[in-house]
């Protein structure tokens, strides 16, 4: 059975958090809403399309390892933290190093240092290592928010062996839990979406301009996963496929019906280029 046939045969778990509920939560916390979202690529992996999406071919797909900055009138909030070069190189072989952008990671480090809070969406290395491996970990951890599930993953099942953390270090984070969605800052809501990983979260951002941004993080690796409702096909990725397929279907409905909502996808290079060229996402971090 092909990857596409296997995915079609999956009994989906419907994702049922109403967008209207998420919008309501965005207005719960007092304070000004954000004015912009900026993005940065700190590295990239290159994979055949047949690994990125079910039914793909051997066309190489460049998948950036990115992080995003939510800009408020008086501060910033970071969504994820990228990864240092040592951690990035742990995904490569010595004879085939993948692209790493040291200058961009240096900018990301400055943005992490000046952020009011940092949110880590899940425990995978390209999302957390910019904090966990930082020389100033203690300073960054004090303003970094992780869920109980993420804390457990960092402690017991790290993405790479060198990312194993002690309970003492993990307890320096701000650790919390919630139901289906949680307002983390004015106009900004975390959405619980286990599937890609047990601790995975999406992020909704309502801007002062009236525009809405929904960061789907790693539910799909590229927008085509959402547009075609086709999951990943990489054999090394161990997901809860029924959960992911239900989330892809929900995101597909947002993509097709909610014209005011801009979707972000962590690893979609083409989409990030398009959004920065249109001005929907800023191409430079501030710090």
Image: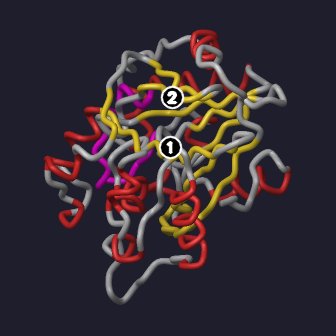
Q: Residues within 10 Å of mark 1 (few under 14, many from 20)?
A: many
In magenta segment, residue 37: no
| Residue 62 visible (yes or no) | no
Which tag, 2 or 1, sits closer to the chain's start?
1
Mark 2 highlights which residue? 184
Residue under the point 56% across and 76% down: 101
The prevailing secondary structure element of the residues shown in magenta is loop
Residue under the point 55% across and 68% down: 42
| Residue 270 visible (yes or no) | yes
Quarter where residue 30 is shown:
top right
> Is residue 111 found left or right of 137 in the rendered image?
right
In which quadrant will I find the C terminus? Answer: bottom right
Mark 1 highlights which residue? 117
Residue under the point 50% across and 33% down: 202
Residue 36 in the image: x percent, y percent? 75, 43
Q: Is residue 212 above or below residue 236?
A: above
Q: Nearer the viewer, residue 44 or 149?
A: 149
In which quadrant will I find the N terminus? Answer: top left
Magenta span of residues: 231-245
Q: What whole-number distance in Å separates the C-alpha atoms at marks 2 and 1? A: 10 Å
Count of marks placed on residues: 2
Helix, strand or loop under label 2: strand
In magenta segment, residue 241: yes
């Amino acid at each position: 059975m092909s990857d596409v046939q296997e995915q079609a045969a999956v009994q989906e778990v419907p994702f049922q958090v109403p967008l209207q509920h998420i919008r309501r939560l965005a207005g719960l916390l007092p304070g000004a809403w954000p004015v912009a979202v900026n993005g940065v690529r700190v590295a990239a992996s290159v994979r055949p399309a047949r690994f990125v999406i079910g039914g793909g071919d051997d066309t190489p797909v460049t998948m950036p390892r990115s992080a995003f900055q939510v800009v408020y009138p008086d501060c910033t909030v970071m969504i994820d933290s990228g990864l240092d070069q040592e951690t990035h190189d742990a995904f490569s072989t010595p004879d085939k190093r993948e692209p790493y952008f040291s200058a961009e990671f240096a900018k990301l480090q400055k943005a992490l240092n000046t952020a009011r809070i940092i949110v880590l969406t899940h425990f995978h290395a390209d999302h957390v290592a910019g904090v966990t491996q930082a020389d100033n970990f203690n300073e960054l951890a004090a303003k970094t928010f992780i869920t109980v599930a993420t804390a457990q993953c960092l402690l017991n099942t790290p993405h790479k062996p060198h990312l194993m953390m002690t309970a003492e270090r993990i307890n320096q984070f701000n650790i919390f839990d919630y139901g289906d969605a949680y307002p983390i800052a004015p106009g900004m809501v975390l959405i619980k979406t286990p599937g890609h990983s047990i601790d995975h979260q999406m992020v909704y951002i309502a801007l002062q301009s009236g525009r809405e941004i929904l960061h789907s993080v790693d539910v799909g690796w590229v927008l085509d996963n959402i547009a075609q409702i086709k999951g990943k096909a990489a054999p090394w990725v161990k997901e809860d496929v029924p959960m992911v397929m239900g989330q892809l279907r929900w995101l597909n409905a947002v993509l097709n019906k909610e014209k005011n909502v801009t979707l972000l996808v962590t690893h979609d290079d083409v989409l990030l280029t398009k959004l920065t060229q249109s001005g929907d996402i800023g191409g430079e971090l501030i710090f």
